[in-house]
Amino acid sequence: MHYLRRMTSMIFEKDFNSSIDKETLNWFYKRSFKNIYPPIIAKFNDNYFQLNNFSYSGSGVFLIEFEGLKDLINFQTTLTDDISLVELSNLLSVIDKFDLDYKGVKIFEQKNIKGRKNFEILKKIKELPENFKDYIVEKNITLKQLGVFFNLKDNHKKIVYDFLNKKNKPSVGDFRNLLNLLYDYARLIDIDFYDENYLNKIIREKNIYYFDVMDDLFNLNKIFKAKNIRFDSISNFENCILNVTFGIGSSDDFYEKINFMSKNGDKVKNFYEKLKKYDLC
């Protein structure tokens, strides 16, 4: 670390003209620094910031002077390994406090975190309950999984909170399955607490409905196949949109297919009635 070449010898707190800020750069999450050495103090713009060993009670410290705040932060992130998403969220708050651009903060590049969406997810982590943060750190929950969580409705987020409270450190697979269930079956779930029996019932009923609807879609396409017209649900019936696909070789061909669809419009209407019956539309 080239920064260490700029480190002075050990000095004492009484030698400072100003007090040491021990809070601003303490973005670490429930972490103990098992280090026999005194803490490292960063000097920046005549201010002094403690970077590690925050529980240290002695008077001796090491001092490094930094010309840029990004250099300071890039150095601090090298003082420990395995920086968690919770810590990155805390660090993001520090960076925002100083109104810094994220670009050039190396830890985000190393963790392959880029794009507005991912940084928005990181910011939201800071507001999660402590037991959820503990779970993220212990189970190494991914940014992608948290992105699914933050896209849930508020009452469905409460189901996840309750799930974490009721289950003793559930597996990552169980956590992921719950997120997918809440996301895929969102319109059918109207509770705000974790009820395993209720959710399993939703899955069973939805699967019955799904296969029934798929049979009707097959029959619908069988009718329109005569004119090479096809209906598909790109969303797998998570919304009401059906994509209609057909090719034309001439304007006459176009009008012929439009007329055919018009004459068989009742078949499409009946299909949508089935979707409404199952509350899929």
Image (cartoon, rainbow, N blue to C red):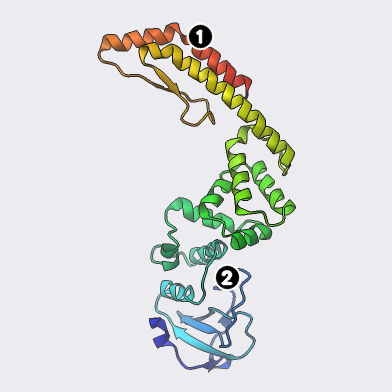
Quadrant in the picture for the C terminus: top right
Whole-percent x and y of residue 58? 62, 90
Whole-percent x and y of residue 195? 73, 41
Whole-percent x and y of residue 57? 64, 86
Whole-percent x and y of residue 67? 39, 79
Q: Residue at x 43, y 59 (%)?
A: 112
Left-right relation of 257 to 59: left
Q: Which residue is mark 2?
A: 28
For the residue pair 215 and 267, the one nearer the viewer reads as 215
> Which one is earlier in the sequence, the residue at label 2 or at label 1?
2
C-alpha gap between disc 2 and disc 1: 63 Å
Quadrant in the picture for the N terminus: bottom left
Q: Residue at x 41, y 63 (%)?
A: 109
Q: Amino acid at mark 1?
A: Asp
* Residue 244 position (above or below residue 5): above
Callout 1: helix, strand or loop? Answer: helix
Residue 102 visible (yes or no): no
Callout 2: helix, strand or loop? Answer: loop
Would you call the spot at circle 2 few (<14 residues within 10 Å), some (14-19), or many (20 or more)? many
Would you call the spot at circle 1 few (<14 residues within 10 Å), some (14-19), or many (20 or more)? few
Mark 2 touches mark 1? (CB < 8 Å): no
**What is the number of the mark on residue 266?**
1
**What is the number of the mark on residue 33?**
none
Left-right relation of 219 to 132: left
For the residue pair 120 and 142, the one nearer the viewer reads as 142
Residue 123 visible (yes or no): yes
| Furthest residue in direction top, as rendered | 263
Q: Residue at x 60, y 68 (%)?
A: 29
Comparing labels 2 and 1, the label whose residue is closer to the camera = 1
Q: Amino acid at mark 2?
A: Phe
